[in-house]
Image (cartoon, rainbow, N blue to C red):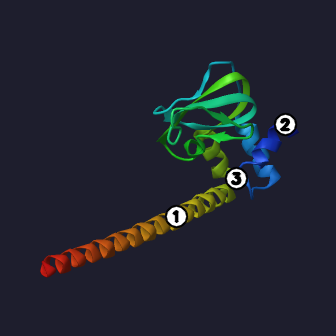
Amino acid sequence: MQVNETLMRPMCGVPLFRGLSLEQISMIARSAERIVYREGDTIIAADSEGDAAILVVSGDAVRISGVDLDGGLEVIDEGSLLGEMAMLVEMEYGSTVIARGMVRALRITREGLQELMEHDPALVDHFLHKIAGRLSDLACELRSVDQALASASEASTASSSSITGESVRQAQLH
């Protein structure tokens, strides 16, 4: 089956796929299910078992629930990959995304991707490298937060000590 440019363009823009050859991306696209969501259809549902990532090829979708949403809606851009970890590992989706109009998408299943990785071990190496890089970035961010909290704690302790020392001096004067 030939994969047209309409499918290849959004796939090439996904950070998780960057670094794969066009042939590898084409293999993934050929193995993916083409799906059309109608207005109001749920594309992914929070707390439901995820067995696939959904690549929004075209159309209008919004995230209506999930982490960091703060009660509003988040527009999902064409080329977005929803639930990307679900195509690699067992997980539950963390957000609910619905179609606001017709949405054309690719459904990249874990089962289908695992079959491809059996035939092309370079895919395994690629995804491991990408995930390890993300974990490393997260570890750096956590260290920065930890350092900021430690500095704030030290400043608070120093300020408390200063206040306590001043209070003792004031009491001694009276």
Instruction: Classify mark 3: residues with Cα within 10 Å, few (<14), some (14-19) or many (20+).
Output: few
Q: Position of residue 158 (x, y in %)?
A: 32, 76
Taking the view exactly as shown, the residue that stands out farthest to the front is 174
Is residue 122 shown to the viewer in this render? yes
Q: Earlier along the polypeptide chain: callout 1 or callout 3?
A: 3
Instruction: Judge from the rendering whether residue 126 lies leftward or rightward of residue 21; answer left or right.
Output: left
Contact between marks 3 and 2 (CB within 8 A): the answer is: no
The label shown at residue 141 is 1
Regarding mark 3 in the picture, which secondary structure is present there?
A: helix
User: Residue at (60%, 46%) from the top-left corner?
Assistant: 114
Which residue matches tag 2?
Answer: 6
Instruction: Judge from the rendering whether residue 33 lies leftward or rightward of residue 66; answer left or right.
Output: right
Q: Amino acid at mark 1?
A: Glu
Regarding mark 1 in the picture, which secondary structure is present there?
A: helix
Contact between marks 1 and 3 (CB within 8 A): the answer is: no
Which residue matches tag 3?
Answer: 15
User: Residue at (66%, 59%) from the top-left corner?
Assistant: 126
Q: Position of residue 127 (x, y in %)?
A: 63, 56
Q: Amino acid at mark 3?
A: Pro
Q: Amino acid at mark 2?
A: Thr
Regarding mark 2 in the picture, which secondary structure is present there?
A: helix
Distance in Å between CA atoms under marks 3 and 2? 18 Å
